[in-house]
């Protein structure tokens, strides 16, 4: 659940920069791209954890 909370926090953090980037601010666009990469990495960690949980449930049957 901690990783999910990190993901939500990261998405909230990028909101202001996203608005600035849409307005044409190139520096904000760079920050958005970096944040999106961080979000992708966190999402991948969540996917891995979910698969681990699913695998342990399958083995317990």
Image (tube, grey):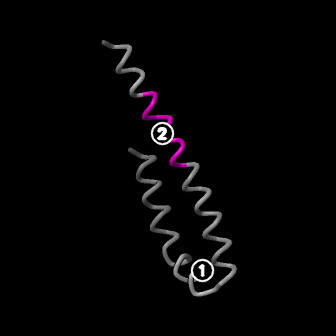
Q: CA distance from mark 1 to mark 2?
A: 29 Å
Above or below, comparing residue 59 to residue 54 in the picture: above
Quarter that holds the N terminus: top left
Task: Bin the neighbour count of mark 1 within 10 Å (Cα to Cα): few under 14, some 14-19, many 20 and up.
Answer: some
Residue 49 belongs to the span the image colors magenta: yes
Along the viewing direction, whichever of 15 and 24 lies nearer the viewer? 24
Task: Bin the neighbour count of mark 2 within 10 Å (Cα to Cα): few under 14, some 14-19, many 20 and up.
Answer: few
Along the viewing direction, whichever of 24 and 39 lies nearer the viewer? 24
Q: What is the secondary structure assignment of the residue under circle 1?
A: helix
Residue at image coords 63%, 78%: 28
Q: Looking at the image, which residue sits at the far bottom? A: 23
Residue 6 is situated, as x and y percent measured from the top left of the image, at 46, 54
Quarter that holds the C terminus: top left
Residue at image coords 54%, 76%: 18
Mark 1 highlights which residue?
Answer: 21
For residue 47, which numbered disc appears in the image? 2
Q: What is the secondary structure assignment of the residue under circle 2?
A: helix
- Magenta region: which residues? 42-52
């Amino acid at each position: 659940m901690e990783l999910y909370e990190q993901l939500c926090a990261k998405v909230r953090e990028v909101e202001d920069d996203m608005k600035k980037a849409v307005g044409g601010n190139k520096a904000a666009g760079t920050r958005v791209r970096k944040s999106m990469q961080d979000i992708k990495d966190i999402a991948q960690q969540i996917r891995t954890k979910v698969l681990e949980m699913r695998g342990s449930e399958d083995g317990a049957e």
